[in-house]
Image: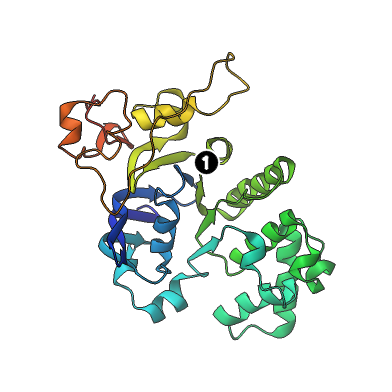
Amino acid sequence: MPLLDVQNLKTYYYTLRGPVKAVEDISFQVEKGEALGLAGESGCGKTTAALSILKILPKGGKIIGGKILFNDKDIVKLEENDMRKKVRWKGISIVFQGAMNALNPVYKVGDQIAETILVHEPHTKKKETKERTAKLLEFVGIDPSRADNYPHEFSGGMRQRALIAMAVACNPDLLIADEPGTALDVIVQAQVLKMMKEMKSRLNLGMMLITHDLSIIAETCEKCAIMYAGKIVENGDIVRIFKEPLHPYTQGLIKAFPSIKTAKTEMTSISGFPPDLLKPPPGCRFHPRCPYVMDVCKKEDPKPIEVTTGYYVACHLVKKK
């Protein structure tokens, strides 16, 4: 039984112009102790998928179909009170994009981590909370004495680490990280990712990493799901995706990314632009940009095919082996 099993999830944003089909019929799984990377261009629905899992969608956002099974319980059916008490922070926690905006600027960092513990474990004594806060800061590579500092006194990398400490304060089973490398220089980014990888192993965490940077996924994850215009087009083992991508969009993404290991080749971009999700094109949503487009692509939406065990591709070009 997987830790997280998302089945045919649909999430729309209702606007005055009509529903924005941000997430359309996506499915994926995360096992305990495993990291899944969710990759794709900006606006493809990655963050919406994460917010759906925690049921913290902004105004106008609504899950209209599918299941989100966490430890075999359907989150979609849970009431808000149960989500707050049983799932968020204790079961699933999230590290939001933009560490400075996610921390309250007028509260000390240590107090914010302690508050997370006290809200979800109200019977914890003050002394124990302080000790746990110190251990959490030390765990993410921050001197515990810095607990009395305010967020603006931390560097970008330290703020990111503090957020991760807060996210694991209640010992969750699943950690979602939304663009953990945003606004960090490459050295600090590498340090944060290394720490997350070690933490996943030590705590046996399931992890879901959301990013547009394929190199981060290659370094951190065992599995990868490629999203395009609200749909998952390829999903499976990370090595297979990088070595033998089957979907034309995945192939385009990898060709647009430089490599320091293979022979020097010219990078190529994917022509065109992502579709308007208010009025997505009929058939395959990638067909207006696809170099291999066929007539069937313009009419029929391709369903995911399991080409090998646990490896899925949604493309009319791909046949089951």
Q: Secondary structure at mark 1?
A: loop
Extreme top residue here?
Answer: 263
Q: Position of residue 301 (x, y in %)?
A: 19, 40
Query: Horizontal and vertical percent for residue 86?
Result: 44, 74
Residue most extreme to the front: 17
Q: Is residue 164 above or below residue 128?
A: above
Q: Residue 54's quadrant in the figure?
A: bottom left
Q: Amino acid at mark 1?
A: Cys
The residue sitting at 35% across, 53% down in the picture is 1
The image position of residue 104, as x and y in percent, is 66, 73
Q: Quadrant of the C terminus?
A: top left
Q: Is residue 162 left or right of residue 229?
A: right
Q: Is residue 202 left or right of residue 256?
A: right
Classed neighbour count for the residue bearing mark 1: other residues with Cα under 10 Å, few (<14), some (14–19), many (≥20)? many
Location of residue 50 with respect to 314 vertically, above or below: below
Q: Is residue 269 above or below residue 9?
A: above
Query: Which residue occupies 33% across, 74% down?
Result: 78
User: Residue 152, located in which quarter of the rendered image?
Assistant: bottom right
* Residue 276 position within the rendered picture, expressed as x and y whole percent measured from the top left: 32, 48
Please tell me which residue lies in front, 186 or 44. Answer: 44
**Residue 165 appearing in the image:** no
Q: What residue is at 63 percent from the left and 52 percent from the top?
A: 199
Q: How many marks?
A: 1
Q: Which residue is mark 1?
A: 221
* 209 to the left or right of 180: left
